[in-house]
Amino acid sequence: MKVPNCDVRDAYRRAIAKVWGLKQKDIKGDIHIGSRAPGQWSPRSIVEIYCEGYIPNATDVHYSEYGTLYHSENWCQIDDMANQFIQKKHPGGQKFFSEPYNNAVVSVWPS
């Protein structure tokens, strides 16, 4: 079952806000339908997410005295949560995953 791109965008916005503890209104301008994204980095993707403001990129790594934090692990949580939101609205709908396009953009694709 095909899921509308706007529902995928909204699910990722909700999941990103929840995982990173952000307000949706603060990140709304950074999450776009791929074909209509202003940067057109990955126009064939379902969603294009800009990680230059509040949203950490999946390629980011932070080192501290407590260990190493890989943001890619958080993006796996975001994928799982976004897919749960999508399944609630579209039972049996397709699933999606994110992948870094570059150091400032994450693309979302159907699985």
Image (cartoon, rainbow, N blue to C red):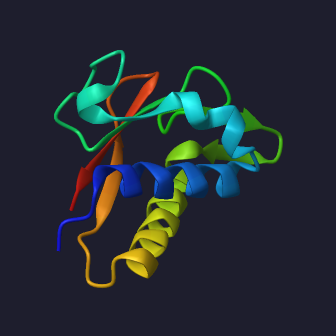
Residue 14: quarter of image: bottom right
Front one among 29 and 58? 29
Residue 99: quarter of image: top left
User: Which residue is rendered at x = 18% and y = 66% of the image?
Assistant: 2
User: Which residue is rendered at x = 42% and y = 48% of the image?
Assistant: 9
Residue 111: quarter of image: bottom left
Q: Residue furthest right?
A: 65
Front one among 61 and 51? 51
Question: For this view, does 62 lie left or right of residue 90?
Answer: right
Q: How far across and down, in percent of the image, does residue 47 sit?
A: 34, 41
User: Which residue is rendered at x = 59% and y = 50% of the image?
Assistant: 16
Q: Residue furthest top?
A: 39
Question: For this view, does 7 lie left or right of residue 85?
Answer: left
Q: Residue furthest bottom?
A: 91
Where the N terminus falls, by quadrant?
A: bottom left
Say above or below: 10 vs 107: below
Say above or below: 111 vs 59: below
Say above or below: 90 vs 104: below
Q: How far across and down, in percent of the image, does residue 12 sit?
A: 48, 52
Q: How far across and down, in percent of the image, does residue 44 sit?
A: 16, 35
User: Which residue is rendered at x = 23% and y = 39% of the image?
Assistant: 45
> How many numbered badges does the structure rendering display?
0
